[in-house]
Image: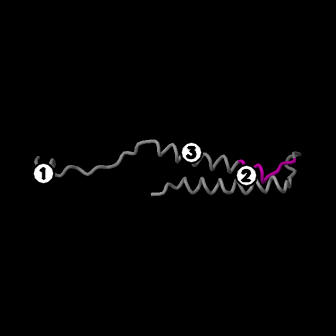
Amino acid sequence: MLDLRTPIGVYFLLNCVILVIVGIKEPTESNIGGYMINLNLLWGIVMGVFGAFMLSLVMMDKNKPHITATKPDTEASTNE
């Protein structure tokens, strides 16, 4: 079963790449609070950090052993 964090992480990393490229090629800066900020570059970095965080959660979860439910032994229950 596919972990939902994987496609979310990939989606945000792809958006990161697109926004960072657009932010570098066309630096349209917005005047926010007196500071000139490149919003595409800023949000590209934010999305990249979030996407990397989601994928790191997936990788950390794959290293943990999962507890699986086992079927009860039918012979032991019939002997009682």
SS under mark 2: helix
**Marks 1/3: CA distance?**
46 Å
Q: Work out whether mark 1 precedes mark 2 in sequence or the reverse, and give the earlier one.
A: 2
- Which residue is disc 1 drawn over? 78
Q: Look at label 2 and name its amino acid.
A: Gly
Please count the marks in the image.
3
Rendered image: mark on residue 56 = 3
70, 59: nearer the viewer: 59
Q: What stretch is highlighted in magenta?
A: 36-45
Q: Quadrant of residue 21?
A: bottom right
**Marks 1/2: CA distance?**
62 Å
- Which residue is disc 2 drawn over? 44
Rendered location of residue 5, percent (x, y): 54, 53
Q: Residue at point 59% right, 55% down?
A: 8
Q: Which of marks 1 and 2 is in front?
A: 2
Q: Left or right: where does residue 29 sit relative to residue 76? A: right
Q: Work out whether mark 1 precedes mark 3 in sequence or the reverse, and give the earlier one.
A: 3
